[in-house]
Amino acid sequence: MITPANPNQIAEALTGRNYTSFSAITTYQACPLRYFFRYVEGLPEETVGSSLVFGGAIHSALEAHFRELLAGNSAPEDRGLNNFPRCVQFLVGA
């Protein structure tokens, strides 16, 4: 007998997360097969958009900068926001 499950249980059974993100929903609407490969099978994307790389680098640099400030340290020249170019190179794989 099949027992009804709530949407969170269905999402967790399919993706391992107990929620469905907006990007997962829009991916499914655009291409159900792409959704399957990305969210159910967990296959990596073939390419990564430049905005994702840029955003990841900004996030990493800001995180390093504010971690130093929260720890009571001044942000040294070789870390934090000055780290941004190195974060980009790391994320791009250069």
Image (cartoon, helix red, strand yellow):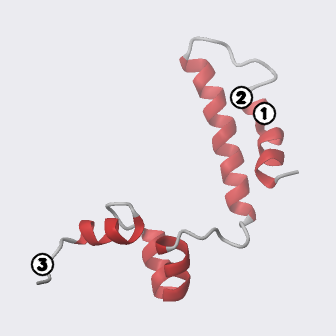
Mark 3 vs mark 2, CA separation in Å: 52 Å
Mark 1 vs mark 3, CA separation in Å: 52 Å
Q: Which residue is mark 1?
A: 83
Q: Secondary structure at mark 1?
A: helix
Q: Disc 3 marks which amino acid?
A: Thr
- Looking at the image, is 12 positioned above or below residue 29? above
Crowd tier of the residue under label 1, counting other residues whose Cα lies within 10 Å: few below 14, some 14–19, many 20 or above: some
Mark 2 vs mark 1, CA separation in Å: 5 Å
Q: Which residue does the image show at 33% across and 63% down from the upper left?
A: 19
Q: Which residue does the image show at 11% across and 84% down from the upper left?
A: 1
Q: Which residue is mark 3?
A: 3
Q: Position of residue 66 (x, y in %)?
A: 60, 27
**Any part of residue 31 in sight:** no
Crowd tier of the residue under label 3, counting other residues whose Cα lies within 10 Å: few below 14, some 14–19, many 20 or above: few
Q: Position of residue 52 (x, y in %)?
A: 67, 59
Q: Secondary structure at mark 2?
A: helix
Q: Position of residue 63 (x, y in %)?
A: 61, 34
